[in-house]
Image: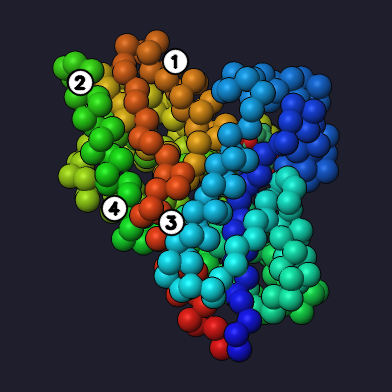
């Protein structure tokens, strides 16, 4: 048929304003409002990154727009993108509803995060699938694209330029630290692919860039009592400094755009920790709307579309 295919582009979501932080945080905590202390602490982190602006919103908007343009170039007129956010408006369900309202019958869903975990991407897909079924849409999903050659190439370019920047920062050994958002340790008992996929991306990107001295570490663990995957980057920085390293290139490969977990956890917190340990820390640039990343997304979408029965 000549009907268009809806592409549900899913991302984490961020508040719309300072007043929206409490609602957002409550949503992340599955309906449990944060304590006033926790809310104040998160508000302070947003204030520290850019003073009351939420960069993830504009970045996601730009990524969806750029993916639309990339799909239009590859298959003119076939695809139309809709946005669906995990923790903010427009929610994942809103995106599916908007497609149905436009008369879309077939959709492909993709998440702006390359690695699959049942606790991350799995959660996005479950919600989209449920809403699609309820509205009679036929949906296919891209589960991961962590080894797409264009993703690896985009990371290679960033590693090389990050290392060049550090080369100008004086003498001393350099360690490349790949990182991703930690998850509760219990994912290990679920035989979850998250850790393996992250290591595969790190290995492929390091190899492509000719980097042999690297490590993988976790970041941004949640503030709960259960154990989270470690070691955390702050602990790894201490180890690396004890081993005599003077320079660190941070490569947060679990993320694809500039947002709180990169702009605060790496650029403010990890950088300050490195400085205290007498080290220089630089970070690779995030993918944002990099054309290679957009092509990796577009090719993953058309591939999933092709397998449709
Ligand atoms: O810039 C922004 O406004 C949003 C930045 C942001 C991104 C992000 C990505 C991921 N998260 C993942 C897992 C968890 C788990 C919990 C959790 C909690 C938070 C909190 C904030 C937050 N996350 Fe997030 N995450 C971002 C922001 N995240 C804020 C709440 C305060 C805190 O703990 O720091 C724990 C939930 C719970 O309490 O039960 C689990 C994963 C990703 C990467 C994949 C993806 O993008 O979906 C996994 C961006």
* Label located before the other in sequence (2 or 3): 2
Which residue bears the numbered disc 4? 153
**In the image, is 247 to the left or to the right of 190?**
left
Report how far apart the C-alphas of labels 2 and 3 lie in the structure: 31 Å
Of circles 2 and 3, the one toward us is: 3
Quadrant location, the N terminus: bottom right
| Mark 1 within 8 Å of ligand 1, using the beta carbon | no
- Compared to residue 195, the image places residue 49 above or below, namely above
**In the image, is 133 to the left or to the right of 47?**
right
Q: Are marks 3 and 4 in contact (CB under 8 Å)?
A: no
- Compared to residue 261, the image places residue 308 above or below, namely below
Residue appearing at x 50%, y 36% in the figure: 258
Looking at the picture, how far across and down is residue 111, in whole percent? 56, 57
Q: Nearer the viewer, residue 123 or 218?
A: 123
* Label located before the other in sequence (2 or 1): 2
Kindly indicate the quadrant of the structure image that contains residue 276. top left
**Crowding near pointer 1: few (<14 within 10 Å), some, many (20+)?**
some
Looking at the picture, how far across and down is residue 22, in whole percent? 79, 31
| Mark 2 within 8 Å of ligand 1, using the beta carbon | no
Looking at the picture, how far across and down is residue 234, in whole percent? 45, 25
Which residue bears the numbered disc 1? 272
Residue 190 in sight from this viewpoint: no
Ligand 1 quarter of the rendering: top right
Report how far apart the C-alphas of labels 4 and 1 lie in the structure: 30 Å
Which residue bears the numbered disc 2? 168
Report how far apart the C-alphas of labels 4 and 2 lie in the structure: 23 Å
Which residue bears the numbered disc 3? 294
Element at label 1: helix
Report how far apart the C-alphas of labels 3 and 4 lie in the structure: 12 Å
Q: Are marks 1 and 3 in contact (CB under 8 Å)?
A: no
* Label located before the other in sequence (1 or 3): 1
């Amino acid at each position: 048929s000549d009907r268009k295919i809806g592409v549900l582009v899913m991302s984490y979501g961020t508040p719309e304003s300072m007043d929206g932080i409490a609602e957002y945080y409550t949503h992340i905590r599955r309906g449990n409002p944060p304590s006033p202390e926790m809310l104040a602490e998160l508000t302070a982190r947003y204030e520290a990154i850019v003073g009351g602006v939420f960069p993830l919103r504009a970045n996601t908007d730009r990524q969806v727009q750029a993916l639309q343009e990339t799909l239009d170039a590859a298959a003119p007129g076939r695809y139309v993108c809709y946005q669906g956010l995990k923790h903010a408006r427009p929610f994942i369900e809103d995106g599916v509803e908007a497609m149905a309202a436009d008369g879309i019958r077939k959709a492909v869903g993709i998440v702006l995060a390359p690695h699959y975990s049942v606790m991350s991407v799995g959660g996005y897909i479950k919600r989209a699938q449920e809403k699609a079924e309820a509205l009679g849409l036929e949906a296919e999903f891209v589960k991961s694209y962590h080894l797409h050659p264009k993703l690896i190439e985009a990371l290679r370019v960033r590693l090389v330029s990050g290392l060049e920047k550090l080369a100008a920062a004086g003498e001393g050994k350099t360690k490349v630290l790949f990182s991703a958002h930690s998850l509760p340790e219990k994912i290990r008992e679920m035989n979850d692919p998250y850790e393996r996929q992250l290591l595969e991306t790190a290995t492929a990107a390091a190899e492509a860039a000719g980097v042999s001295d690297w490590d993988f570490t976790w970041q941004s663990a949640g503030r709960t009592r259960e154990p989270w995957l470690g070691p955390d980057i702050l602990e790894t920085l201490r180890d690396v400094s004890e081993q005599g390293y003077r320079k660190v290139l941070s490569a947060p490969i679990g993320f694809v755009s500039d947002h709180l977990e990169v702009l605060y956890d790496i650029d403010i917190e990890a950088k300050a920790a490195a400085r205290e340990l007498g080290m220089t820390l630089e970070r690779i640039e995030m993918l944002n709307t990099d054309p290679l990343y957009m092509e990796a997304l577009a090719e993953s979408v058309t591939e999933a579309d092709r397998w449709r029965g």
